[in-house]
Image (cartoon, helix red, strand yellow):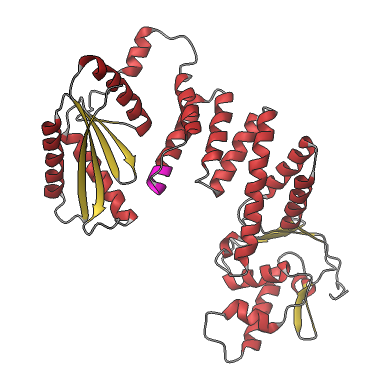
């Protein structure tokens, strides 16, 4: 065996690299949350990850000082780093640093004679066993145990290190793959609590996966948590719109409508319903609503117009940069927030407004002909220029008659 024999009897060492990097033995533990040099932890992580081979000093020079001016004596600098590292490992047990890290023929290595358990090894083993399992119950059991080990990405505090990136991507991809396969299996077994927790764990790592939100909403609905399902949809909708300018899928909207319908899960009085429907007396100006709600209102008005023949128009306001190029996200968010408040105040209480993309608002203008609608748009543009004369935004408007159903 390449490593040296232990000079003292060392108890089994448990190493976690998914999320927080920590080492524990008996009642002692050290982790990368301690106020110590980042390079010490980087060196320790690299030695442990490459524990089955010797690591040459030249390789460690590159690891530790690649982007810095080279030391006039890199050998001494490296020896100093290992001295500090061994002092750190001594906190686990006496002489731990001397016995855990060995040197032979000019290279450094982790002593493989020390009993060692590593969370990434167990995670990978469970994942591969689960992927190969034919029985759905056994597959799910392996997946759930593996997923419970994933407390964060591989060496999360060292995520910018070149050697960490591909390893982190591998474990992250495996984590997402197992979660996506485990969720339908949990759903089949009606394990709603486990399903809810898994969804929240995945979304902490992958906040833009709409499919996971749908699984979460479904699990909450089956547990009778209708208000929580509504809040999940609203948070997801806002995130997708602000980040990508897209609306939720039909599946997500259907789950949202189911949640809305079942918020009142018992027979209630007409007075209670009327109280729920009553708008706040403080509400002024146009009605601002989500795009899904806007479409329902639009369809209702379109049906009514088909019978009455009233003039109703749609107005679209789009935001661009002054030279026609898109604004930066920070500038766009500020402009859209200011523009929404201005639109609300410029329109009547009977008008309805919704943000329909990351940089656009759509307005439903009942009892307004084309000329009146054009004047309304001009008034909004002028008010914006007057209120924000130095804004880099340029507003474009278009008007369209509502077509009766």
Asked whether 241 falls inside the magenta stretch, the response is yes
Region in magenta: 240-244
Residues 350 and 46: in front is 350
Look at the image and tell me whether residue 154 can be seen. no
Q: Which picture quadrant has residue 302? A: top left
> In the rendering, at what x and y percent does residue 279 appear?
28, 22
Position of 204 relative to 213 (above/below): below
Residue 21 shown left or right of residue 320 in the figure:
right
> In the rendering, at what x and y percent does residue 230 appear?
46, 29
Residue 364 shown left or right of residue 122 in the figure:
left
Look at the image and tell me whether residue 159 can be seen. yes
> In the rendering, at what x and y percent does residue 334 appear?
27, 50
- Please report the residue visible at 33 percent of the width from the left and 18 percent of the height from the top: 277
**Residue furthest bottom in the image:** 72
Residues 284 and 91: in front is 284
Residues 16 and 373: in front is 373
> In the rendering, at what x and y percent does residue 39 appear?
59, 73
Quadrant (top left, top right, bottom left, bottom right) of the C terminus: top left
- Please report the residue visible at 78 percent of the width from the left and 74 percent of the height from the top: 53
Residue 221 shown left or right of residue 376 in the figure:
right
Q: Which picture quadrant has residue 268? A: top left
Asked whether 307 falls inside the magenta stretch, the response is no
Position of 67 relative to 144 (above/below): below
């Amino acid at each position: 065996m390449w490593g040296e024999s232990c000079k003292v009897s060392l108890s089994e060492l448990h190493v976690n690299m998914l999320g927080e990097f920590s080492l524990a033995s008996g009642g002692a533990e050290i982790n990368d949350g301690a106020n110590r040099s980042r390079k010490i932890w980087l060196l320790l992580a690299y030695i442990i990850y490459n524990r089955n081979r010797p690591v040459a000093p030249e390789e460690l020079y590159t690891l530790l000082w690649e982007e810095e001016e080279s030391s006039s004596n890199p050998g001494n600098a490296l020896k100093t780093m290992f001295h500090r590292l061994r002092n750190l490992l001594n906190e686990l047990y006496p002489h731990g640093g001397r016995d855990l890290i060995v040197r032979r023929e000019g290279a450094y290595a982790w002593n493989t004679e020390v009993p060692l358990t590593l969370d990434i090894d167990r995670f990978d083993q469970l994942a591969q066993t689960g992927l190969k399992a034919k029985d759905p119950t056994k597959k799910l059991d392996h997946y759930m145990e593996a997923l419970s080990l994933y407390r964060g990405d591989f060496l999360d505090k060292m995520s910018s290190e070149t050697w960490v990136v591909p390893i982190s991507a591998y474990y992250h991809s495996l984590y997402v793959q197992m979660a996506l396969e485990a969720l339908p299996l949990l759903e089949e077994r009606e394990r709603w609590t486990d399903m809810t927790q898994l969804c929240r764990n995945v979304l902490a790592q992958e906040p833009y996966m709409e499919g996971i939100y749908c699984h979460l909403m479904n699990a909450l609905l089956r547990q009778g948590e209708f208000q929580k399902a509504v809040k999940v949809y609203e948070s997801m909708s806002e995130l997708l719109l602000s980040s990508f300018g897209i609306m939720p899928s039909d599946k997500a909207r259907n789950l949202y409508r189911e949640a809305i319908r079942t918020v009142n899960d018992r027979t209630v009085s007409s007075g209670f319903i009327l109280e729920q429907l009553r708008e706040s007396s403080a509400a002024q100006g146009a009605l601002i609503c989500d795009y899904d709600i806007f479409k329902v209102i639009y369809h209702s008005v379109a049906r009514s117009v088909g019978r009455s023949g009233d003039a109703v128009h749609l107005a679209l306001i789009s935001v661009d940069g002054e030279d026609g190029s898109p604004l930066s996200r920070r500038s766009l968010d500020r402009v859209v927030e200011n523009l929404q408040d201005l639109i609300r105040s410029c329109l009547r209480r009977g008008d309805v407004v919704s943000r329909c993309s990351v940089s656009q608002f759509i307005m439903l203008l009942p009892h307004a002909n084309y000329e009146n609608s054009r004047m309304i748009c001009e008034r909004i543009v002028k008010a914006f220029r007057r209120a924000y004369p130095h804004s880099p935004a340029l507003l474009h408007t278009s008007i369209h008659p509502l077509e009766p159903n």
